[in-house]
Amino acid sequence: MVTYIIRRLIAAVLMLVVVSIVTFSIFFVIPRLAGVTATDFANRYVGSKGATAETVAHLAEKLGFNDPLTVQYGRWVKGIVAGSEFDTGVSIEHCPAPCLGYSFITKTPVWPELLDRLPVTVSLALGASVIWLVAGVATGVLSALRRGSFFDRAAMGVALAGVSLPIFFTGMISLVYFSYKFGITVPGGTFVSFTESPVQWAYSLILPWITLAFLYAASYARLTRAGMLETMGEDYIRTARAKGLPESRVITKHGLRAALTPIVTIFGMDVGLLLGGAILTETTFSLPGVGRYAVQAISANDLPKIMGVVMLTACFVVVANLIVDLLYAVVDPRVRLG
Amino acid sequence: MTFLELKDLRIHFPTDDGLVKSVDGLSFTLERGKTLGIVGESGSGKSVTSLGVLGLHKGGRAKISGEIWLDGEELVGASAEHVRKLRGKKMAMIFQDPLSAMHPYYTVGNQIIEAYRIHHDVSKKVARKHAIDMLARVGIPQPDRRVDSYPHEFSGGMRQRAMIAMALCCDPELLIADEPTTALDVTVQAQILDLMRDLQRDFNAALIIITHDLGVVAELSDDILVMYGGKCIEYGSAEDIFERPEHPYTWGLLGSMPRLDREPTERLLPIKGSPPSLINVPSGCAFHPRCPYAERTAGRSETEVPELLETAGGHRVRCHLPGERRRAIWEKEVMPNLEGTS
């Protein structure tokens, strides 16, 4: 078990290195291959409109866009680990570690801004994930146990709708009805932090939670149903019944336990990805989270911010993967061998 | 009073293609301490019968009729909850493939403890002690350590031993073994059969062995029931079946069994054709399309379902051929071929 954990940890660290190389390549190597020059970079990053060609070239030199790509990558990684300074020629901008980038457009380092927005995204992702996990798995199990019944057909019909309907549709509809027509929930753009008032926090997020959870619960219900149907046909279920176990115990201890294993994997990945920003949900409900930050950065063509969000999301996914791998070994003893 | 008695048991499954008559009018009796071997090809209804006795078809789609009497209690009409309480305690089952029949996520000990504690109100500690005793009893070395192993950490033979320990942990009076050695190596098969014979003697349980392997039933059985197309076609003592078999299908089974006393160059004699469909069972005698002697019944085998009739001393056969004809065929045509001409 210990060697398994160590192996997974090493794999996760290696994965992060690969992720950083890929991210760096997307933002620096590929444009370079496509013919973008160092001065283009300087123009793009600093946005020096109307500056003379000479100034821009000088700036490109100062910011290191002329250096070999490996040196630039090294400097970028060093910034993440130890922080870095950007000499714009006019001033020296300080970016403390972990420096995921410095936005010359808003003249701010990216990381503190991300930190500001993380609570919103984390609240949204965690709250929604609890709802969809419970609702999705419960629906899936009931559907599987009553296969072909009215409940099963209705649930699977709703699930199909849930999988097919995009958030900007379900979100808008629910905002129109629940917030504006009935006034049950708060209008979009409201967020109260947990530390301020847990009740208000939950109240402000309930609609985004349900909207987001609906989408995921639908696919989890389908997955759980399929897994449960398969598991309940296994020989060990017949053995459990032959031992004289009550059916409720057969379903929970023997059936559900095995059916949940693949769900754990997908759950970890989904939550990891969402922590990097629920772009559609945050945009629809005007929540100031990482996803909305990314959208704004994309509209403003603010590359360091976009790169920062990409790195953050990638880290969440890698960490989520690590947790899933470790959990898997706890859930399924056969994994510990491999 | 008979310990186990099946009276005209029928287990039918309605499907989109028609009614599957998996078991169609099966009757037999079994006493404590005795062993019954049920033999037949795949799909002859052997396993469905055993699951039916355990009440595992209850609540499903199966239509069950007839009677199952276990120690004075009728089980077909009993409530599912009542039969559940008997399962594991009064009657237990050993399955074919112990790897898939044990839950991969729980230790062997956990699964035995669970089986024991459903029927006995004891602490985990006591149950664990009992589980270790049971593992020792079925010949698992270092049972106090192996109790915490997972099924995948056991070898095939050890897993089947653990399965047997689990089935026997509540001291059942009826033990049903469904192809207990089919998934095992030949060398391990003999060990498991020996173990089952010893344990049956110790526990004085009634044992039903379900198999397609006549060698297995020859080792263990007192009585043998041959099934074909959901019906019993021959029933008798092991001696009757091996020395004086009367049904052409039984002859076929004996002929297709590899034997050491036969010339190695001789070919096995397979039964031609394939097992009958249980939805469109052949008219008359279900075996007639494959029976080499069907034409000697003057067409009756195609139109009339033969009765299961007693020939001598509890030996019963379902065949249209007259008794003396059958014995003549067996002695003159079949037996010489089986024993080799050398």
Image (tube, helix red, strand yellow):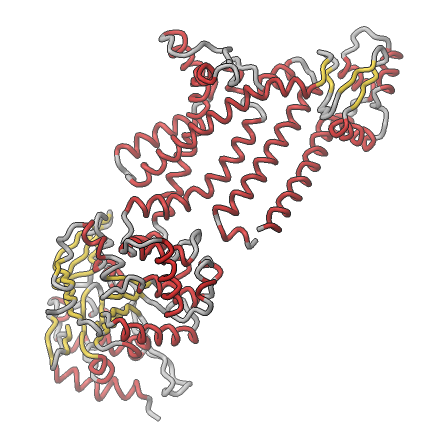
Q: Position of residue B342 (x, y in %)?
A: 35, 93
> Is A259 located above or below residue B13 in the figure?
above
Q: Nearer the viewer, residue A108 or A235?
A: A108
Q: Is residue A54 visible?
A: yes
Q: Is residue B97 visible?
A: no
> Is B261 located above or below residue A319 in the figure?
below
Q: Is residue B275 left or right of residue A299?
A: left
> At 42% from the left edge and 74% from the top edge, which residue is drawn?
B186
Q: Is residue B162 left or right of residue A193?
A: left
> At 46% from the left edge and 39% from the top edge, which residue is drawn?
A263
Furthest-bottom residue in this view:
B342
Q: Position of residue A4 (x, y in %)?
A: 60, 49
Q: Position of residue B178 (x, y in %)?
A: 30, 65
Q: Nearer the viewer, residue B11 or A322?
A: A322
> At 37% from the left edge and 7% from the top edge, which residue is drawn?
A181
> Is B283 located above or below residue A323 in the figure?
below
Q: Nearer the viewer, residue A122 or A271?
A: A122
